[in-house]
Image: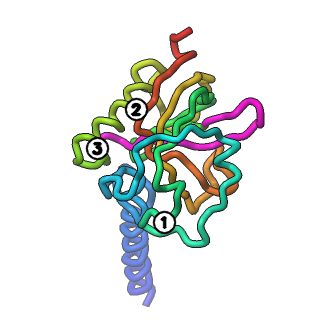
Amino acid sequence: MRVFSAAMMAALAAVVVAHAAVAAPGPQCGGTLWKQMTLADNGKSVNWNPLTTTIPEIAKLSAPSRITASRTTGFQRRVWKMNDVVIERYRQASNGELVLELFDVASSTYMNAYIPSTSCMTSNAKLRKAMIGARNGFVKHCPAATPSWQMVGAHAVIFGVGFWNPSKATQGALANGAELRPLVGLTITQGCGKF
């Protein structure tokens, strides 16, 4: 009886470990909202004429009652531009995404913006080029991203598509879950070697 129980326990442990390896966050691409996060939906319904905004203006928006794989709000269907935003800190997520914590000095408000890993980007050449350009606008000037948050305090002009994140647990997340994800343009104007 003991041998049978030990064998069953070992088998159960192996199944749990195997399931955890598949389900745990990591270097994989995918998920319910992945097409929006990487423009793999080809930016369907997105208005590519940017509107200038600020973190406090985005913080006032009301999140939809249900976040789906389709772009259902005006915020998600637009490219937004921020003229002088502070990138306070950044890190690289386990899937290779660059996570930027943005900061508005006047209102002391934080917000997150993301640039996907090149290996997870859409195959659409035009959109891919825009996201790679945004990524290069950061990585070519600032120290290499690591899994740990790094302070930077750089100023930038950024362009990004509106995104509602159902999770608000990430450091710097707005209470309404609004993010710019993905960024399709980024120019460092001050900091990271620029004056």
Sequence order check, earlier mark of 2 and 3:
3
Sequence order check, earlier mark of 1 and 3:
1
Q: Is residue 163 left or right of residue 178?
A: left
**135 shown above or below 50:** above
Q: Secondary structure at mark 2?
A: helix
Cβ–Cβ under 8 Å for marks 2 and 3: no
Spatial CA distance of label 1 from label 3 is 27 Å
Q: Secondary structure at mark 3?
A: helix
Most distant residue in the top direction: 195
Which residue is labeled 2 in the image? 134
In the rendered view, how is the structure colored?
Answer: rainbow
Spatial CA distance of label 2 from label 3 is 15 Å
Q: Position of residue 105 (x, y in %)?
A: 73, 30
Camera sees residue 97: no
Which circle marks residue 119 in the picture?
A: 3
Which image quadrant is residue 6 in?
bottom left
For the point 47% across and 40% down, the residue is: 50
Which residue is labeled 1 in the image? 72
Q: Position of residue 163 (x, y in %)?
A: 51, 54
Q: Amino acid at mark 1?
A: Thr
**59 shown above or below 108:** below
